[in-house]
């Protein structure tokens, strides 16, 4: 699995858009724990690169829908699911498993 970014490239409580295997992913840094999610909100396709990262959630900037970073679920709208991928950090390298 290829390295998609380094730890220092993704700001704390921030995001970074990356390309992997022809697919765009959004890396999220939640206080040193990294996640990989799709780049658009499943509600109406709003870009999530400007989303708020807080308390283990990613909040869509358009309508405020909140998705759990751990599994992509949306507690207020269970019919919506944000796609997520497993991430591991080796040293300073972030690796995503597209499976």
Image: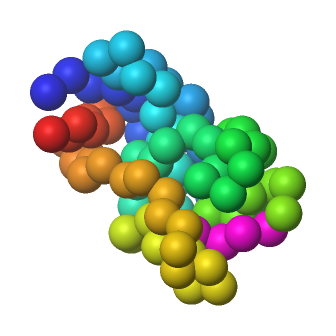
State the colouring used for the structure image: rainbow
Residue 57 falls within the magenta-colored stretch: no
Q: How many marks?
A: 0
Residue in view at x 85 percent, y 55 percent: 62
Instruction: Tell me the quadrant of the picture where the N terminus can be found.
Output: top left
Residue in view at x 73 percent, y 50 percent: 44
Q: Residue furthest front?
A: 79
**Front residue of this view, candidates 96 and 44:** 44
User: Is residue 61 rendered to the left or right of residue 20?
Assistant: right
Residue in view at x 62 percent, y 42 percent: 40
**Front residue of this view, candidates 99 and 14:** 99
**Place of residue 97 in the rendered image (x, y in percent of width and height, measured from the top left):** 20, 39
User: Is residue 54 rendered to the left or right of residue 88?
Assistant: right
Q: Residue furthest right?
A: 62
Instruction: Tell me the quadrant of the picture where the C terminus can be found.
Output: top left
Q: Considering only vertical position in the picture, is 72 above or below 17?
A: below
**Place of residue 91 in the rendered image (x, y in percent of width and height, measured from the top left):** 23, 40
**Place of residue 72 in the rendered image (x, y in percent of width and height, measured from the top left):** 45, 65
**Residue 95, quarter of the rendered image:** top left
Residue in view at x 30 percent, y 17 percent: 21
**Place of residue 11 in the rendered image (x, y in percent of width and height, measured from the top left):** 61, 44
Q: Report if residue 4 is visible in the image.
A: yes
**Residue 19, quarter of the rendered image:** top left
Q: Residue furthest top?
A: 22
Magenta region, residue range = 64-69
């Amino acid at each position: 699995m290829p390295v998609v970014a380094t730890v220092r490239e993704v700001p704390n409580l921030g995001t970074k858009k990356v390309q992997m295997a022809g697919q765009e992913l959004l890396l999220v840094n939640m206080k040193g724990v990294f996640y990989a999610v799709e780049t658009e909100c499943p509600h109406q396709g709003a870009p999530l690169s400007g989303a708020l990262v807080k308390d283990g959630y990613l909040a869509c900037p358009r309508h405020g829908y909140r998705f759990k970073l751990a599994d992509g679920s949306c507690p207020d709208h269970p019919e919506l699911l944000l796609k997520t991928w497993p991430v591991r950090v080796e040293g300073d390298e972030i690796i995503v498993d597209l499976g």
